[in-house]
Image (tube, rainbow, N blue to C red):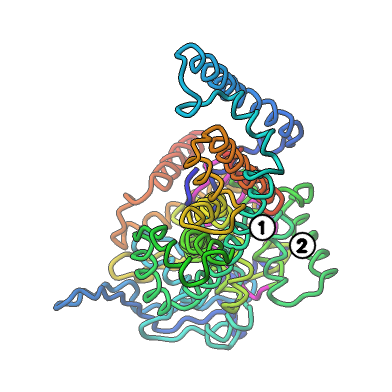
Amino acid sequence: MSLNVQPIPGGPRSEAEAATGRRGAGTLRTARTLGFDLPAVIVFVGGIVAWELLVGALNLQTFVFPKPSAILAALQANWASGRFALLPSALATLQEALLGLAIGTVAGLAVALTTARWATARGILLPLAVAANAVPIIAFAPLLNNWFGLLNPLSKALMAAVLVFFPVMANVTRGLVQVDPAALELMRSYAASEWTILRKVRIPNALPYFFTAMKVATTLSLIGAIVAEYFGGAASVLGRMIVQSASALKFDITWAAILFGAVTGITFYLVVVAVERLVIPWHAAMRADG
Amino acid sequence: MTTPTTPAATPTSPSAAQPIVSIAAVDKQFSRGDRGGRAITKALEGIDLDVAQGEFVSLIGPSGCGKSTLLRIVGDLTSPTRGTVRVNGKPANQARRDRDYGMVFQAPVLFDWRTVEDNVKLPLEILGYDDARRTARAREMLELVELGEFLRHHPYQLSGGMQQRVAIARALAFEPAILLMDEPFGALDEMTRERMNGEVLRIWQKTGTTVLFVTHSIPEAVFLSSRVVVMSARPGRITKVIDVDLPRPRTDETRETRRYFELVTDVREALRAGGAALDDSETVGGAAASVDRTMAEGAVG
């Protein structure tokens, strides 16, 4: 999938094609998705089984490579209580990530709207943003911890926010600016104001770019929160669980915590996909048809 | 041959009444700002043209003759280097602000996030029509272009010809004083193009709107127009204006009449005299060749 959303992807259809309705397309798509996903599911399950069997066959120690069954057992034992209570930790980390996602997205959108509206702002901000984006921002985590407090969830949320900011800003700016020139001429022929053009052309045009950014941003927000936690934080957060269980050589718990993070990340992603389908159904349909 | 009965057929030249478009001594130069030497391209030179209310005027010429530029100057999408353009008795800029223009481009420029109906409503939203009036008007226009069944479709579900019909419905929705069409059927195949030409004439006669139409297809220009304005390239000038006295309503049979072939030949010779080698488009060459063949057959029969 490319970021460049053309107005007429794949070219126009033939009269006949257009005349035969679109019924049955939904079921067809579901079937196609299932057919597409089935091999992936088989490989995934097969991988887990192979992992379980190989660890047993090679007689690997649990602290080197725990079996999936051992990880599941650790998950069950440490679900909500004890020193390594995973569920509350995951929820705490999720809160930090969500807060960071919200802050980073709002800031990214604000800057994108500013740069799209004023060319001068674009000239100043975009090169700076590109330069800043090349910096390994995660390195700032200890500083943020220092500024906002080691135990303050805000220091983790801000790490997530900084990571989220750049893809949102860069993508949405592109979506707002890269509008079909003919569409702008059309709006000009209606003597439409800049504000009208923003509302009726630029923002709808930017929506697919925004959702592309959000798919990356959700993952980045979790990474930001967990890595910031590595450098210290409240006791029951996912990052601390991972660091502490690893230093206590309870690697089955480490794996269980990572699993929690993975599931959270995937859920996050799926939520974005669902919202995207809801908000810009025309885009998904266009892609499926193109 | 029947005598023309529709009022639109009568004014083949600008009437004594005030013309709706009045182009006077228009020059257009593009300068490429090379450092040091400035290269100036003369796109248009000494253009004078009046278009009367209800006329269908085509601009034809080779690529680079500035026909699209002239249309864009009339529509105030770009401004002339010298000269004046008055539309409805006002400067072009004022006419654009007063929403006197309906524009149709080569690409349909429909928004994929809007349904067909909502695309047609777009200019009506900008002009502040209330919701009921928007809906009524959009549906009326879509009936006019015979897409009433496709209200809830999205543009990407339509064929190229259907998309262009939506664009025409949108352009006419707010009853602009003049319709500016910039090679609207240039991207369509020959068969669809001929059908669309019939559609446009039908719509034009039903609405009585004035049309300024840019094309590089000779048959299309002759079939549609009250007058064909022939242009030459570098600099873009008007070399000849040919009155098309074919009776209306024009139908597929019109394309097979002797007068039609004569006019096609007139336009082609005017293009040649203007130094226009028809090398810019296969469509023009192909269409002209097929006309030649049909004409030969007609002469035999």
Q: Marks 1 and 2: in contact by CB < 8 Å? A: no
What residue would you read off at disc 2?
B138
Residue that extends furthest to the left in the rendered view of this protein: B36
Q: Is residue A85 left or right of residue B64?
A: right
Instruction: In the rendered structure, find residue B248 and report the number of the disc placed on it.
Output: 1
Give the answer, above or below, for where B174 lies relative to A93.
below
- In the rendering, at what x and y percent does residue A208 appear? 57, 54
- In the rendering, at what x and y percent does residue B126 appear? 68, 74
- Say if residue B156 shows up in the picture: no
Q: Is residue B124 left or right of residue B109?
A: right
For the residue marked with disc 1, what is the amino acid? Answer: Arg
**Chain letter of the residue beneath label 1 in the structure image:** B
| Residue A233: in magenta span | no
In percent of the image, x 61 and y 38: which residue is there? A288
Do discs 2 and 1 belong to a common subunit? yes
> Which segment is the magenta one?
B176-203
| Residue B177: in magenta span | yes
In percent of the image, x 60 and y 59: which residue is there? A96
For the residue marked with disc 2, what is the amino acid? Answer: Ala
